[in-house]
Every structure is written in structure tokens, then in C-alpha cells.
């Protein structure tokens, strides 16, 4: 074993150009991730504000310049990108597949299981606080195992409804694990072929029984979009600022147009109407040259903080917003302060709770899970699992 004082085994305090480039790219994607996570919470806060106003005998005019639910598509694209970006040293390497899936399990499972358990506890103790409270043994087991299954009412969602998006994430992780044994470009090519094949089989064989009907939804193509962006990023592609700005503006404009026609996002339409604009926006952020955003700037630090806590934000925000809704109704604050005060305070408290949960609960759980699975701490910023928006379907 080398001496502890030997310079050769010490990590240099100075980053290499490649490490700096990777960190700065991640920072810029984190900015996008933070904005997407915040938009998800805004949508759901508006949902509960509308419920409060209805209870008060008033109407609420929501603000939807873009379809906030498209945040799910942005996050799926980012997920494909980040899995390629952070796994570049694992492709075609002995033990790479095990290391990848172990890290993803350690990152995604503990907090989701904990909050699924909390949701079940609330469903048993106070079901009136929830929009639905289906608690069936087999259904609960399938939810913990990320197996898509129909609820007793026929809706394909887990016990804790937000987990439907994590079911897609886990599917992607399994497929990625199977292909990571190949060199990067071959792995992404095979992954793309598998995802396209699944979607085509779902379309040609519809209706398929669950979980196959769920797993063959065209939304899974968005992971492929992100993975292809990851390959472009790894190849060093850096388009000019005007080109990136044009692509981002096109993506944003397409989402604004989609907000005027919400019904066209069903089925294949979603992966086109939301998925392609989301990919253009992510492409613009991921392929920006290093140095365009100062890593130590206040905005970058805030975005990185929100991005790091965004998984906790995703899983915690329904609990916090619902609690705030109850508080505003029972205290009469909704009559005094109005719906937008509710939205602002709910978002602020949600962010605070997310930061606390991330630091005091999520990170220790992840470290413990890593030790159990026998994997070391990753050398890069941990970006995952990428949170995606879902909410009890009451609107």
C-alpha cells in the first residue's frame, strides 16, 4: 500500500480541465433542473389554491404560460443525459454494471420507500386527508418494488401516486445497466433500439396487460433523447451561443403553444409536443461551453442547491402543500391573504422542508445504502434520481 503522504495518491486540489468542464456542465443543467422542479411545485400549489378558492365560494384564475406538467418530460430527458454523462468511466468496464445499478438503487430507493411508508401510515390513520387511500397488500408490495400495477380503481399508479414516474426511472436504470457493458456509443445505440422497439410493440399490440402497457408508453423515448444529448456532450460538441439560444427559444415557444392546446399531449403526442421541446431546452443547457455560468456565483449556488434537493422537493411537496392548504383553510388565512399568498408561502416552506430533508435525511440514507451495497462515494456531483412531477388526479 502506498504511503498516506505520497503525493501520487492524493487528489489534487486543482481540477483538471475535463473535471472543470464536467462540473460546469452539471451546474448549468442544475439551473434547468432547479427551474423545472420549482415549476412542478408551482403547478401543484396552484391546484390546491384552486381547491381553497372553490371551498371559499370563489374562482381562481391559474397562471399557465407553459404546461407545467411538461416538467416531467424535461426531467426524463435530463435523466438520460445525466446517466450517460456520469457513467462515462463505467462503459465496457468490469463491474461497471453492478456499480451503476447499485448507486442508482442507493439514490432512489431509501427516500421513496420512507415516504411511501409515510403515505401508507396517513392513509390508514387519516384517509380523509388524501385524495385516495388504496391500501392492498399485493398493491403495496408492487409499489415498493417499482412494478407498475393497477390500483383497485383500475388506474395504473403506485400507492404513493408520484411513484409512477419513478417506475419509469427504474425501468430506464435496468435497461441502462444491461447496455453499459458495451462501449458508450454502442450502448446508447442499443438502448435507443430497445426503447423504440418497446414503444412500437406497445403500439402494435395495444392494449397490452400491465405492466407491459405502462412500460411501452411513448414517454420512455425521452430517456433516449437525453442519452443522445449525453453522447453529444461527451464528444465535445459545443454549438455557438446564438444557435443554443435559438434552440432554447424554439423549445420554450413550442411549450407555450402547447399550453393553448392541452389535449394534444395524449399518447404519442406527449413525447412529441412536450418531449421534443424539452429536449431542445436540455440540449441548449447541456452543450453550453464551460465558463458561461460562474460555478461560484450566487445564482449557480442557489440552482445547485435546489437541484441537489430536488428529489426531496419532488417527494415532499405534496405533503407540505396539503398541510399548508389545511392551515390556510382552518385559520381563515385564505380569506384574508388570498390564493397567491398561499401559493407563495407554500412554495417557500416547501423549499425549506426539501433542503432540510435532503441534508438531514436523504443524504445520510443514501450513504448508508451505499455502504450496504458495497459501493463507494461517487467522485462527481450526485444528480439523481431526476424528480418528475405528478400529483393526485383530482382536477
Image (tube, grey):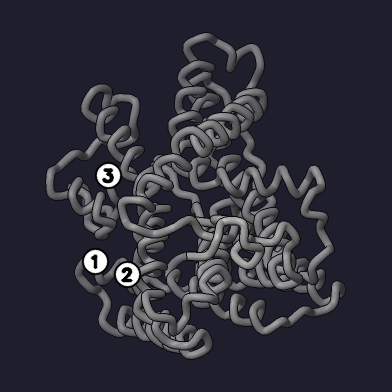
Residue at the outermost right position: 242
Question: How many C-alpha atoms fall within 10 Å of the one at disc 1: few (<14), some, or many (≥20)?
Answer: few
Q: Is residue 48 positioned above or below 243 on the image? A: above
Q: Residue at x 84, y 77 (%)?
A: 240
Q: Which residue is mark 2?
A: 215
Q: Earlier in the sequence, mark 3 or mark 1?
A: 3
Tell me the SS state at disc 2: helix
Q: Is residue 206 positioned above or below 42 on the image? A: below
Q: Residue at x 55, y 10 (%)?
A: 332
Q: Position of residue 212 (x, y in %)?
A: 25, 71
Q: Earlier in the sequence, mark 3 or mark 2?
A: 3
Q: Which residue is mark 1?
A: 211
Q: CA distance from mark 2 to mark 1?
A: 6 Å
Q: Tags 2 and 1 in contact by the CB under 8 Å rule?
A: yes
Q: Position of residue 272 (x, y in %)?
A: 55, 74
Tell me the SS state at disc 3: loop
Instruction: Answer left or right for 98 relative to 223.
Output: left
Question: How many C-alpha atoms fall within 10 Å of the one at disc 3: few (<14), some, or many (≥20)?
Answer: many
Amino acid at each position: 500500500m502506498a504511503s498516506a503522504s505520497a503525493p501520487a495518491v492524493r487528489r489534487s486540489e486543482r481540477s483538471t480541465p475535463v473535471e472543470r468542464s464536467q462540473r460546469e456542465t452539471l451546474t448549468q443543467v442544475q439551473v434547468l433542473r432547479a427551474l423545472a422542479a420549482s415549476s412542478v411545485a408551482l403547478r401543484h400549489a396552484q391546484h390546491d389554491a384552486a381547491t381553497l378558492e372553490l371551498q371559499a365560494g370563489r374562482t381562481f384564475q391559474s397562471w399557465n404560460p407553459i404546461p407545467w406538467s411538461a416538467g416531467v418530460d424535461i426531467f426524463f430527458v435530463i435523466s438520460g443525459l445525466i446517466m450517460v454523462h456520469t457513467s462515462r468511466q463505467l462503459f465496457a468496464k468490469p463491474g461497471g454494471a453492478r456499480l451503476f445499478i447499485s448507486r442508482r438503487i442507493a439514490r432512489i430507493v431509501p427516500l421513496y420507500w420512507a415516504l411511501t411508508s409515510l403515505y401508507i401510515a396517513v392513509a390508514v390513520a387519516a384517509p380523509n386527508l388524501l385524495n385516495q387511500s388504496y391500501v392492498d397488500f399485493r398493491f403495496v408490495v408492487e409499489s415498493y418494488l417499482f412494478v407498475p400495477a393497477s390500483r383497485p380503481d383500475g388506474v395504473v399508479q403506485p400507492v404513493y401516486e408520484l411513484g409512477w414516474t419513478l417506475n419509469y426511472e427504474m425501468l430506464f436504470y435496468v435497461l441502462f445497466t444491461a447496455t453499459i457493458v458495451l462501449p458508450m456509443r454502442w450502448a446508447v445505440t442499443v438502448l435507443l433500439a430497445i426503447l423504440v422497439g418497446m414503444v412500437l410493440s406497445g403500439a402494435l399490440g395495444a392494449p397490452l396487460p400491465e405492466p407491459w402497457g405502462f412500460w411501452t408508453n411513448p414517454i420512455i423515448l425521452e430517456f433516449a433523447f437525453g442519452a443522445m444529448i449525453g453522447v453529444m456532450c461527451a464528444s465535445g460538441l459545443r454549438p455557438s451561443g446564438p444557435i443554443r439560444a435559438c434552440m432554447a427559444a424554439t423549445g420554450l415557444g413550442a411549450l407555450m403553444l402547447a399550453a393553448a392546446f392541452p389535449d394534444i399531449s395524449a399518447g404519442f403526442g406527449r413525447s412529441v409536443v412536450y418531449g421534443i421541446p424539452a429536449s431542445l431546452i436540455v440540449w441548449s443547457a447541456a452543450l453550453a461551453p464551460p465558463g458561461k455560468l460562474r460555478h461560484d456565483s450566487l445564482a449557480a449556488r442557489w440552482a445547485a442547491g435546489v437541484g441537489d434537493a430536488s428529489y426531496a422537493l419532488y417527494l415532499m411537496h405534496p405533503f407540505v402543500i396539503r398541510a399548508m392548504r389545511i392551515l390556510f383553510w382552518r385559520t381563515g388565512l385564505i380569506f384574508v391573504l388570498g390564493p397567491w399568498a398561499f401559493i407563495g408561502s407554500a412554495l417557500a416552506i416547501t423549499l425549506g422542508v426539501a433542503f432540510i430533508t435532503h441534508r438531514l435525511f436523504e443524504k445520510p440514507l443514501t450513504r448508508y445504502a451505499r455502504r450496504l451495497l458495497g459501493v463507494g462515494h461517487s467522485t462527481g456531483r450526485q444528480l439523481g434520481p431526476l424528480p418528475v412531477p405528478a400529483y393526485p388526479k383530482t382536477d
